Image: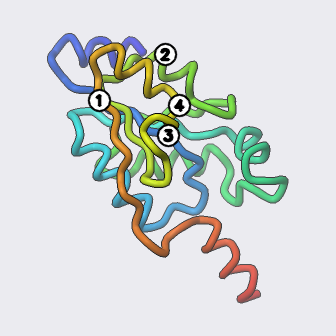
Amino acid sequence: MRIVRALRRRGRRVVFTNGCFDILHAGHVAYLEAARNKGDILVVGINSDASVRRLKGRRRPVVPQAQRAAVVAALGSVDHVVVFSEDTPERLILALEPDVLAKGGDWKIEDIVGSQFVLRSGGKVFSIPLVRGLSTTALVKKISHAL
C-alpha cells in the first residue's frame, strides 16, 4: 500500500479491480485494459485458491493462485497484483483507497463491493461492459465436453 500512496502523491490516479481470473481469456484482457484506461495505475486483486473454491465450487480454480497472479501481472495493462483470501476485496479496497473502482458489467455500481466507500471518498466507480460469449465458466464447460 506504500507504493500506491507514493504514486498518488505524485499525482497518479489509482484504479482497482478484482476477480478470480481463472483461465485467463480475451474477455479478461479487454476488461483489464478498459479498467486501466480509467486511470494511471491498475492494481488487480486476485481471489486466493480457497476464496475461489468458496465462491465457485470445489473443482475451481483450475489454475493455482500463484500462476493466475503471474499471468495477470504479465499483462501490459496491469501494474500491481495482490492476492486476497477473503470472499470480497472490501478490506483491500479500504486499505488501498483507490481513486477509481472498476468491476465487470455483470455488476451494478451500487452492488460493487467498496463502491460506497470510493464514492464517499470522492472517487469514481465503473461497471465495465463484458465481452459477450467469453467466460471462464463457459471455457471450463467446453473443455470438459471436449475430453
3 or 4: tag closer to the N-terminus: 3
Figure label count: 4
Q: Earlier in the sequence, mark 3 or mark 2?
A: 3
Secondary structure type for disc 1: strand
- In the rendered structure, which disc, 1 or 2, sits on the residue that comes first in sequence? 2
Which mark identifies residue 29? none
Q: Amino acid at mark 2?
A: Leu
Image location of residue 53, percent across then percent down = 77, 47
Which numbered mark, 1 or 2, is in the foreground of this view? 1
The residue at the point 22 percent across, 35 percent down is 39
Numbered mark located on residue 124 in the image: 1
Q: Tell me which amino acid carries mark 1.
A: Lys
Q: Secondary structure at mark 2?
A: helix
Q: Is residue 1 above or below residue 30?
A: above
Circle number at residue 94:
2
Kindly indicate the quadrant of the structure image that contains residue 26: bottom left
What is the C-alpha distance between the residues marked 2 and 4? 10 Å
Q: Which mark is residue 18?
A: 3
Discs 2, 4 touching: Cβ within 8 Å: no
Q: Residues within 10 Å of mark 2 (few under 14, many from 20)?
A: few
